[in-house]
Image: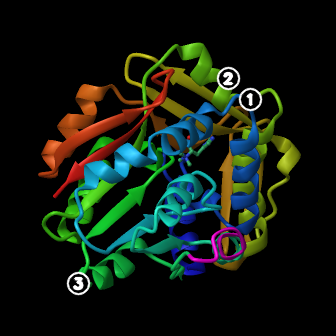
């Protein structure tokens, strides 16, 4: 784990345009800050998806057209707050299924498991910590059909080519007839998007700067957190939100664990995240590119977000 982090950090911080992969936001501390983001009123994706999964559970489950028992495999389950409504619906209707939440944060999975055992004691839950694909590969040998959940709009973090690769990999690790329910944040009034990412509480800033804290801890680096700021902007034409860490001074940072020195110019940027917003046509293009069929788009009432149901 740490080895890949060191390698990716070195690659990103020695590039001409500095960058860091957003997947490294989610150490235990970052996962907690992300919970705070999800609790902000401005961060609408959580509320929109929560509405979809609360109000349309029945329609979603009917659209699966599974006749017997099935698995629900959730990639990046986090605290599972949104999924709870779907699980609750299924348990209350005595549907026969197994829930397999997967996350890279042990802490997040522990909290989720404990909470679900309390709230839905009848739920058959098999939590997994680790890499999506290793666990997906196991699941391919299951006798039951599967519904894969990739919620929260995580796909928005991938550049187009990477998103296509990821979806092809999902496809490859699914059985014919398996379903994918995948969340996409939709293009909308740019002001709403701006406020969700450039939040006035500074929580998203803390989320980004946590990358520096993580490097200090795991790579024995000496980033002075106060000498860096956060900036992000939304381009309504491309649908891209791009997030950056800004160096407030010309400065030098040592990464002692890997014996590296990194120089920052005054106002130099580190690109930390892409959060792409989609139009519905772009979503069906992506599905078709990976040889999925779009079954249905489940939208919230404001049309901010869609959980798109695809079939292999
Ligand atoms: C978890 C990837 C969906 O891109 O909206 C929230 C992460 N970044 N605020 C997103 C995030 C800044 C989030 N995803």
* Label 1 SS: loop
The answer, for residue 158, to whether it is visible in the render is: no
Instruction: Specify which label sits upstream in the sequence, 1 or 3.
Output: 3
Q: Position of residue 97 (x, y in %)?
A: 40, 73
Depth check, mark 1 against mark 3: the one in front is 3
Residue denoted by label 3: 143
Q: Quadrant of the C terminus?
A: bottom left
Q: Where is residue 206 in the image (x, y as percent from the top left)?
A: 78, 46
Q: In which quarter of the image is the N terminus?
A: bottom right
Residue at the (31%, 85%) spot, across then down:
138
> From mark 3 to mark 2, how far is it between C-alphas?
45 Å
Residue at the (27%, 35%) spot, across then down:
283
Residue denoted by label 2: 195
Horizontal side, residue 103 vs residue 112: left or right = left
Does residue 118 belong to the magenta stretch?
yes
Residue denoted by label 1: 199
* Label 2 SS: helix
Q: Give the range drawn in magenta.
A: 115-122
Which one is in front, 291 or 219?
291
With respect to residue 118, does 138 lie above or below? below
């Amino acid at each position: 784990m740490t080895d890949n982090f060191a390698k990716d950090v070195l690659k990103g911080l020695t590039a001409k345009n500095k960058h860091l992969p957003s997947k490294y936001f989610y150490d235990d501390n970052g996962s907690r800050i992300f919970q705070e983001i999800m609790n902000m009123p401005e961060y609408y994706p959580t509320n929109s998806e929560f509405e979809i999964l609360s109000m349309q559970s029945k329609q979603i489950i009917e659209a699966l057209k599974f006749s017997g028992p099935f698995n629900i495999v959730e990639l990046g389950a986090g605290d599972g707050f949104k999924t709870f409504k779907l699980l609750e619906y299924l348990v209350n209707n005595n549907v026969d299924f197994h829930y397999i939440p997967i996350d890279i944060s042990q802490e997040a999975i522990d909290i989720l498991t404990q909470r679900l055992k309390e709230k839905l004691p009848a739920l058959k839950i098999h939590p997994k910590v680790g890499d999506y694909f290793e666990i997906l590969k196991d699941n391919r040998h299951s006798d039951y059909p599967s519904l894969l959940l990739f919620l929260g709009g995580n796909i928005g973090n991938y550049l187009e080519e990477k998103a296509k690769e990821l979806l092809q990999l999902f496809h490859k690790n699914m059985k014919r007839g398996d379903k994918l329910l995948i969340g996409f944040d939709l293009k909308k009034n740019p002001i709403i998007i701006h406020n969700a990412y450039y939040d006035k509480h500074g929580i998203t800033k803390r989320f980004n700067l946590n990358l520096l804290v993580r490097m200090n801890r795991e790579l024995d680096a000496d980033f002075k957190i106060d000498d860096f700021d956060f900036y992000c902007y939304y381009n309504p034409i491309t649908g891209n939100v791009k997030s950056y860490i800004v160096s407030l001074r010309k400065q030098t940072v040592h990464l002692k664990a890997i014996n590296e020195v990194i120089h920052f110019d005054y106002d130099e940027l580190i690109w930390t995240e892409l959060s792409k917003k989609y139009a519905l046509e772009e979503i069906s293009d992506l599905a078709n590119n990976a040889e999925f069929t779009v079954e249905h788009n489940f939208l919230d009432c404001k049309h901010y977000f869609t959980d798109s149901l695809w079939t292999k």
